[in-house]
Amino acid sequence: MRYKSRKNWLKTIGSARSIERLCQEWMRVKILVQKFGGTSVATSEMRNYAANHIERALSDGYRVVVVVSAMGRRGEPYATDTLLSMFENASSVSPRDMDIIMSCGEAISAVVFSSLLRSRGHEVTVMNGAQAGIITTKDFTNARVLEVNPTRILHELGQNRIVVVMGFQGVTPEGDITTLGRGGSDTTATALGVALDAEYVDIFTDVEGIMTADPRIVTNAKRIRQVTYSEICNLAYQGAKVIHPRAVEIAMQKNIPIRVRSTALEDEGTLVTSHVSFLETHVVHDQLITGVTQTTHVTRLLIPASGKDGARVFRIMAEHNISVDFISVQEGKVAYTVPNTKADLAVRLLNESGYSVEVLPDCAKVSCVGAAIAGTPGVMARIYTALAEENVEILQFADSHTTMWCLVRMDQMETAVRALHREFCLEELVQQNVSR
Ligand code: ADP
Ligand code: MG
């Protein structure tokens, strides 16, 4: 991905004043990108909380770029999922057309939100993805950012305006509207943060920050005060949907710190950077596990086959765009998971290619993530014991230096997550950290 930095941009404009001085002035300007998720812009009460955060940033001397998601979640009138539900049975909608409809939710929310900011006395410019300079690949419904050209945003910020950008959207070099896939507004925010050399990218959402487990499952999950890019990426790839992993990877390229924060609170949330500052957090514990997370509704396929067949099996999956996970290739058998929604297709394709398949439907992958796992003996034994005590059967197990994964039955997933959260004392460790 290529970003045109503000320094380069300044060099390209004509100058009445010395370019050098202009550069220096801009370099002193602090920019903040603040992204508000679906629930954070869904009601007038939440939008007012969001506006308070923006005003606080302005009074701290920041120029603010706001990124908004579509308002609300599935079932609510202007949410993206609601717009999509109109077409659930219509295979006649092309991916390119799909992106035109999918990008509407953010258009509505950006204009609604900007009207609130104007009513509070601010000058505001609303931009869609193209106007904000987000250039992407042509992979409609799941495009990747190729380049960000922040010229227009910088111009508007220079006029002391707040810029409200429709998240989740981009444009191809040919001018077609694209969307960035699930969690795409997070990606808009960090891509802009990098291009603008933002001091922080704030991801505002409906929880206090990144928690030690999904608070919908573990009610006493605790906020993690500081975490590294790689750990949160790992958590996010394993299912913690609070921030999109691709967004984290983009911020990491230029070391732009991310803060995951609650819209309804004034708290600092979770700070995501390249290194956790132990001095600042006064962490005295050598915390083994940072968080527990889960990927739900997957089907395990087990194929009696040799390692050589494995290559063919995975090629068949790739040709049909079926993502595979939790791969285990052992003597005489190949096992892996696919999303439940792709299971029938996967089995049919395998049967057609002459493979018999043993199907284990509706499973979940529960993951323990922590940089300190590497080199610590006994972690696997603790996981096995904690789950056995709760009668949770481990269907498959795998580990790496930083993550341990267990496949369990979907109806045992919540029990497993809670048992592991308890086993690694996540509520206690973080509490000490918080109450310094
Ligand atoms: P937004 O619409 O603001 O982008 P998301 O639904 O994408 O919000 O992300 C916030 C949700 O992520 C929370 O409501 C929470 O249920 C879920 N979540 C899952 N795992 C975690 C975790 N480890 N920490 C915090 N939230 C999590
Ligand atoms: Mg999100």
Image (spheres, rainbow, N blue to C red):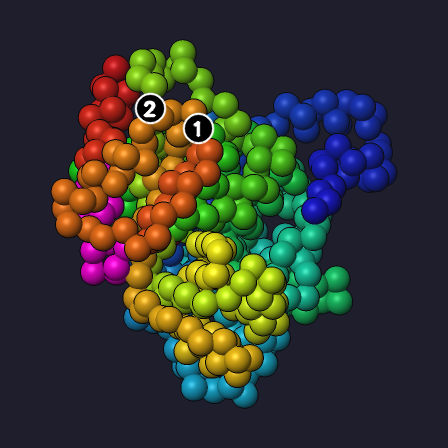
Per the rendered image, the range of residues in magenta is 408-421
In the image, is residue 108 part of the stretch drawn in magenta?
Answer: no
Contact (Cβ within 8 Å) of mark 1 with mark 2: no
Classify 10 Å Cα crowding around label 1: few (below 14), some (14-19), many (20 and above). Answer: some
In the image, 303 versus 425, the foreground residue is: 303
Judged left or right of residue 352, residue 9 is: right
Task: Say whether residue 319 is visible.
Answer: yes
Residue 87 location (% of width, % of height)? 44, 82
Front of the two marks 1 and 2: 1
Task: Indicate which disc residue 287 carries.
Answer: 2
Residue under the image location 31 percent in, 69 percent down: 361
Instruction: Say which label, 1 or 2, has the lower sequence index.
Output: 2
In the image, 310 versus 362, the foreground residue is: 310
Classify 10 Å Cα crowding around label 2: few (below 14), some (14-19), many (20 and above). Answer: some
In the image, 209 versus 278, the foreground residue is: 278
Question: Which residue matches tag 1?
Answer: 374
Give, as a three-letter code, the residue at label 2. Gln
Element class at badge 2:
loop
Element class at badge 1:
loop
Residue 188 location (% of width, % of height)? 55, 50
